[in-house]
Image (tube, grey):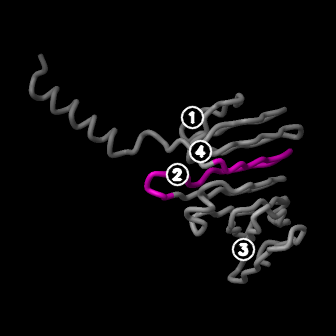
Amino acid sequence: MFSQPSFLAFFALLLAFVASGAAPQRAGLITAVRGDVTIIRPGKEPTKPKIKEDVFEGDTLKTGARGRLQVCFEDDSIVSIGRRAELVITKYLYDPSAKKGAMKIQIKEGFFRVLGGAVTRIAPENFETVAGTASIGIRGCSFGGEVADGTAMIVFFGSNIGGAIDVTANGVRRLLSTPGDGLRVPPGG
């Protein structure tokens, strides 16, 4: 039987654990991994990921000189990164029953490709990729590019349903809707 002080301490600890949001939001899983790849989770040691390993909001995924990685998110969005790349899953929410979703990722360095899933259809305004100093919004399509020394090179690949991407940097917005169109966005550009 618990004494009153120990029960109160246990209850306070339980409330602190629940209030802290201790469990991060599961975002998806790794569907391909090759070469030197690392997952960095807040407050944990970096690890080498495996196929079908879960990824979470807050994870940073890094590849080395020969590394490649692909993540399939809960809403069927797919993000691939190439050699010497760094991807941060900044925000992820997908609730199909409530028709809510949000996805924000950051590409700090390297090659990347993004194929939008259900979040781009139910809440396209909440789907954002930050590449260098550019912010990219998507409307049911795919795009890719590279971030090198802060400069983002972005190419719209298109889709079978049309689609487009909005690229914004320093308050200037460009819409890319023709497959093969691209932009180069230098730091401060």
Residue appearing at x 68%, y 57% in the figure:
106
Circle nearer the N terminus (1, 2): 1
Q: Name the residue under label 1.
A: 44
- Which one is in front in this view, the residue at disc 4 or the one at disc 3? 4
Q: How far apart are marks 1 and 2 (CA)?
A: 25 Å
Return the residue nearer the eye: 74 or 106: 74
Amino acid on which the number 4 mark rests in the picture: Glu
Which residues are drawn in magenta? 76-100
Q: Name the residue under label 3.
A: 166
Amino acid on which the number 2 mark rests in the picture: Tyr
Q: Is residue 64 left or right of residue 19?
A: right
Marks 3 & 1, CB-CB < 8 Å contact: no
- Local secondary structure at mark 3: strand
Q: How far apart are marks 3 and 2 (CA)?
A: 22 Å
Task: Name, please, the residue furthest toward the front.
Answer: 161
Marks 2 & 4, CB-CB < 8 Å contact: yes
Amino acid on which the number 3 mark rests in the picture: Asp
**Classed neighbour count for the residue bearing mark 2: other residues with Cα under 10 Å, few (<14), some (14–19), many (≥20):** many
Residue appearing at x 79%, y 61% in the figure:
160
**Classed neighbour count for the residue bearing mark 4: other residues with Cα under 10 Å, few (<14), some (14–19), many (≥20):** some
Instruction: Considering the whole magenta stretch, tell me its main secondary structure.
Output: strand
**Classed neighbour count for the residue bearing mark 3: other residues with Cα under 10 Å, few (<14), some (14–19), many (≥20):** some
Return the residue nearer the eye: 141 or 128: 141
Q: Is residue 49 on the magenta stretch?
A: no
- Local secondary structure at mark 2: strand
**Is 150 situated above or below 75?**
below
Q: Distance between the residues labelled 4 and 3?
A: 23 Å
- Which one is in front in this view, the residue at disc 1 or the one at disc 2? 2
Q: Name the residue under label 4.
A: 74
Q: How far apart are marks 2 and 4 (CA)?
A: 7 Å
Circle nearer the N terminus (3, 1): 1
Marks 1 & 4, CB-CB < 8 Å contact: no
